[in-house]
């Protein structure tokens, strides 16, 4: 099937870079606070839940790539139009766009919440959110290749932070991890479900796929990226369980930042402040990817100028950010989005795959 | 052309925003009073006395610290009240030690510690300590030998932790143990001594039941708690062994000195321990500790070139440590406090134990906790 806006030669990027795009899309605000949600259900076996979620993602990604491979160069919006027809297809596309903007909003607002809690309690939300959004708009207007570049840069900066976690090792009590498999199967599955919202973001493959140079390799690099993030999440969680006691994790809002609290270098006593500031570099690729993907949809569905839709979606994100005033509201919206993501990212791609399968088979018969 | 202007305008706007972002509340060092130590005492039924030791940055000031005390119902309340009598605003980013009086600690201090953990400006490495008598008196006293009580107290504690004669009492450790099921906190116990109370000493360690202080053990016994709770990498200890162990190798003149024990000092101790839960119904935990060290001092002339003498000494030390260690464990059991973390061992080795604190204390009281020590002398210094 032919697609409308097939990207030109100067817009595509090497599939190899997809690895970092996937990592950066999956790692965002979630990694700062996911421990608590999973440990609450699966206790000290929470790391198994993370591995389960990782396994499920591999399967979902497989379905996604297979769906995309049915077409020559289409993104989710075009697939929707083709497989589900104009009305239902566009409706689902709009839902997906709204979801992407919601994710962007949550990332931004919860980052600002962290800044307000840890660094500057008196800084107004509008100031931070509008300045970060300006940066995002600027980046999105640069196009997908710029965004991929930002992803790689952000990875290089943030990966260095992992090494500082070694400061926690002297405080780690590995006994906290045993007895292994004390949680029952049900608890592990609920834990994995709790984990799901933290690691969403890989659905970005639905939108960047047309921009890949070698589309055959897309599956390989996406799976590698997903595996890498799962391992990072697992590492952070194992370290957190060893470092904190169980009761402590359950009460700590941002356990990962508290992990950095113990880091003390002679010229820098409070490392977590550096982490919070550096974290901007981690959330910017998130915002760029979500906003970019949403505006692609506006172009495909409403035939809007992408430039205008970037401004519009940034304004929308800003507006919702300003509406969220308290920590409780953010938490509520986060939980709601978590439920939504479970269906949109984990269940829906599998259904879509079968619909597409039927549609393309029918078409082939018609052609014959 | 139009596009270029747009980009320039955007970058101008971004840089302007960045400049505005710099306008968050400024924190100028000269206008801050940095709390180094804060002490808390109980005044009456529900009021606290908070004593704040602040760093002075004013080169003209006659004292390097300023001490401000005030009473309120909460710890942060005392800080706000203290601000009323200060030229500089008290901030707690450089807080190193919080000192709680024994009386306060016996009532439980979790509410006071919780606010520290809640405050992002306070580091996780702040030390907690317990004072014999009022914390206010310790902090308010003018010590002739050291000017700054704040940093002095911090260095005293941190030096002893690095030297492995104290157990790490950081805020993180406290919160960890408080919210765990099977381990209790242990904090340094500070005391004023000497003529007119001019010396500040760590005289032992305060034992806790969750957040409530239940007793004190002398520093000598802290060694055994540390041996069982952590592991040694570079510690040292003075230990005594009975004289008759080496009786046969001694000269007649030495034997005549009666039955005084022989004292040994061991250093660069390094230890490793294995715990084994033998019985889970009526908990029995067997602990084996392997410890190596260097003989640094002997209070008697002993020929250390003979392997059999070394072996005899090793055996005697192991025996002595075992006896002492078992005594300490029995004492802890009697006080119903578990700073070693036997509860954690129980929890991590029994599946579906659903251990809670109350359940553990119940079991802990009459658990059988056996200690076995195996000592190896690695070297005896540069002479034999």
Image: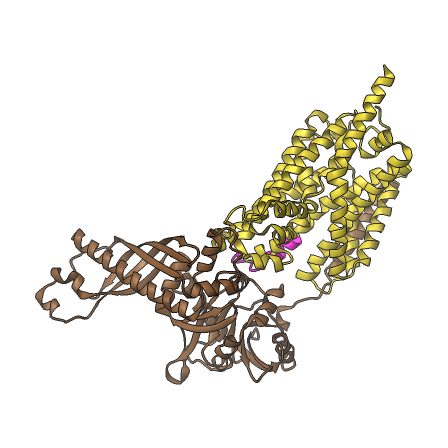
Chain colours: A yellow, B brown
View extreme (top): residue? A368
| Quadrant where the C terminus of chain B is found in the figure | bottom left
Q: Residue B247: x and y, percent? A: 14, 63
Residue at horizontal 75 percent and vertical 58 percent from the top: B19
Question: Is B157 drawn above or below residue A192 in the view shown?
Answer: below
x, y percent for residue A267: 54, 58
In the rendered image, the residue lying farthest to the left is: B252
Is A47 covered by the magenta stretch? no
- The stretch drawn in magenta includes residue A269: yes
Using the rendered view, name the quadrant where residue B164 is placed. Answer: bottom left
Determine if residue B185 is in view. yes
Query: Compared with residue A153, is residue B152 higher up or lower down, i.e. above or below?
Result: below
- Given residues B261 and B324, the one toward you in this image is B324
Look at the image and give the residue range highlighted in magenta: A264-277
Q: State whether residue A87 is above or below residue B315.
A: above
**Can residue B199 be seen from the camera position used here?**
no
Occupied quadrant, residue A309:
top right
**Image-based side of A360 in relation to B62, left or right:** right
What quarter of the picture does the N terminus of chain B occupy?
top right
Instruction: Where is residue B142? Give x, y as percent.
Output: 46, 82
The image shows residue A233 at horizontal and vertical percentages of: 61, 45
Q: Nearer the viewer, residue B353 or A240?
A: B353
Q: Nearer the viewer, residue A301 or A277?
A: A301
Residue located at (65% from left, 68% from top): B28
């Amino acid at each position: 099937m032919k697609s409308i806006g097939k990207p030109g030669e100067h817009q595509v990027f090497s599939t190899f870079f997809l690895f970092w795009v996937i990592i950066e899309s999956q790692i965002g605000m979630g990694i700062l606070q996911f421990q608590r949600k999973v440990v609450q259900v699966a206790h000290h076996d929470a790391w198994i839940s993370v591995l389960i979620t990782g396994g499920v993602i591999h399967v979902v990604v497989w379905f996604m790539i297979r769906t995309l491979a049915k077409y020559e160069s289409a993104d989710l919006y075009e697939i929707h139009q083709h497989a589900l027809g104009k009305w239902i297809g566009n409706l689902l596309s709009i839902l997906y766009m709204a979801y992407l903007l919601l994710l962007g909003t949550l990332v931004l607002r919860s980052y600002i919440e962290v800044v307000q809690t840890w660094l500057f309690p008196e800084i107004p939300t509008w100031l931070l959110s509008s300045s970060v959004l300006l940066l995002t708009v600027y980046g999105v207007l640069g196009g997908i290749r710029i965004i991929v570049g930002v992803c790689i840069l952000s990875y290089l900066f943030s990966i260095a932070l992992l090494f500082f976690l070694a400061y926690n090792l002297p405080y780690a009590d590995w006994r906290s991890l045993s007895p292994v498999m004390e949680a029952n199967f049900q608890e592990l599955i609920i834990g994995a479900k709790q984990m799901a919202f933290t690691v969403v973001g890989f659905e970005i493959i639905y939108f960047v796929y047309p921009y890949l140079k070698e589309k055959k390799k897309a599956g390989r690099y996406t799976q590698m990226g997903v595996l890498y993030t799962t391992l990072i999440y697992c590492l952070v969680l194992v370290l957190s369980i060893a470092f904190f006691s169980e009761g402590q994790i359950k009460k700590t809002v941002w356990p990962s930042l508290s992990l950095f609290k113990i880091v003390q270098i002679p010229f820098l006593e409070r490392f977590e402040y550096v982490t919070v500031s550096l974290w901007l570099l981690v959330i910017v690729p998130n915002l760029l990817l979500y906003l970019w993907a949403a505006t692609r949809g506006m172009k495909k569905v409403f035939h809007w100028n992408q430039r205008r839709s970037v401004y519009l979606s940034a304004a929308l994100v800003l507006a919702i950010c300003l509406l969220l005033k308290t920590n409780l509201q953010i938490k509520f919206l986060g939980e709601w989005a978590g439920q939504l993501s479970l269906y949109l990212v984990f269940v829906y791609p599998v259904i879509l795959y079968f619909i597409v399968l039927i549609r393309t088979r029918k078409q082939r018969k018609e052609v014959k | 052309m139009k596009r270029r202007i747009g980009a320039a305008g955007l970058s101008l706007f971004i840089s302007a925003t960045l400049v505005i972002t710099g306008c968050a509340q400024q924190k100028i060092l000269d206008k801050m009073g940095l709390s180094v130590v804060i002490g808390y005492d109980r005044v009456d039924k529900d009021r606290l006395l908070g004593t704040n030791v602040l760093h002075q940055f004013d080169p003209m000031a006659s004292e390097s610290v300023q001490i401000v005390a005030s009473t309120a119902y909460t710890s942060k309340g005392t800080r706000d009240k203290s601000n009323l009598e200060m030229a500089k605003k008290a901030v707690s980013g450089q807080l190193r030690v919080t000192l709680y009086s024994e009386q306060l600690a016996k009532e439980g201090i979790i509410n006071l510690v919780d606010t520290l953990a809640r405050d992002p400006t306070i580091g996780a490495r702040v030390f907690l300590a317990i004072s014999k008598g009022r914390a206010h008196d310790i902090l308010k006293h003018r010590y002739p030998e050291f000017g700054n009580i704040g940093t002095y107290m911090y260095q005293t504690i941190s030096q002893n932790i690095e030297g492995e004669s104290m157990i790490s009492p950081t805020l993180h450790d406290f919160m960890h143990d408080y919210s765990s099921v099977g381990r209790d906190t242990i904090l340094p116990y500070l005391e004023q001594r000497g003529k007119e109370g001019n010396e500040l000493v760590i005289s032992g360690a305060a034992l806790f039941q969750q957040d409530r202080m239940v007793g004190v053990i002398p520093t000598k016994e802290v060694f055994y708690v540390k041996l069982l709770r952590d592991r040694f990498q570079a510690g040292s200890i003075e230990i005594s062994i009975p004289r008759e162990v080496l009786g046969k190798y001694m000269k007649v003149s030495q034997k005549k000195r009666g039955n005084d024990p022989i004292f040994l000092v061991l250093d660069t101790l390094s230890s490793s321990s294995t715990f084994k839960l033998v019985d889970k119904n009526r908990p029995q935990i067997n602990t084996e500790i392997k410890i190596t060290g260097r003989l640094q001092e002997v209070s008697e002339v002993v020929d250390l070139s003979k392997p059999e003498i070394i072996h005899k000494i090793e055996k005697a030390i192991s025996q002595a440590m075992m006896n002492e260690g078992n005594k300490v464990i029995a004492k802890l059991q009697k006080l119903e406090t578990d700073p070693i973390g036997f509860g954690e061992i129980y929890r991590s080795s029994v599946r579906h134990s659903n251990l809670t604190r109350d359940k553990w204390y119940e079991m802990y009281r009459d658990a059988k906790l056996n200690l076995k020590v195996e000592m190896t002398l690695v070297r005896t210094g540069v002479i034999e």
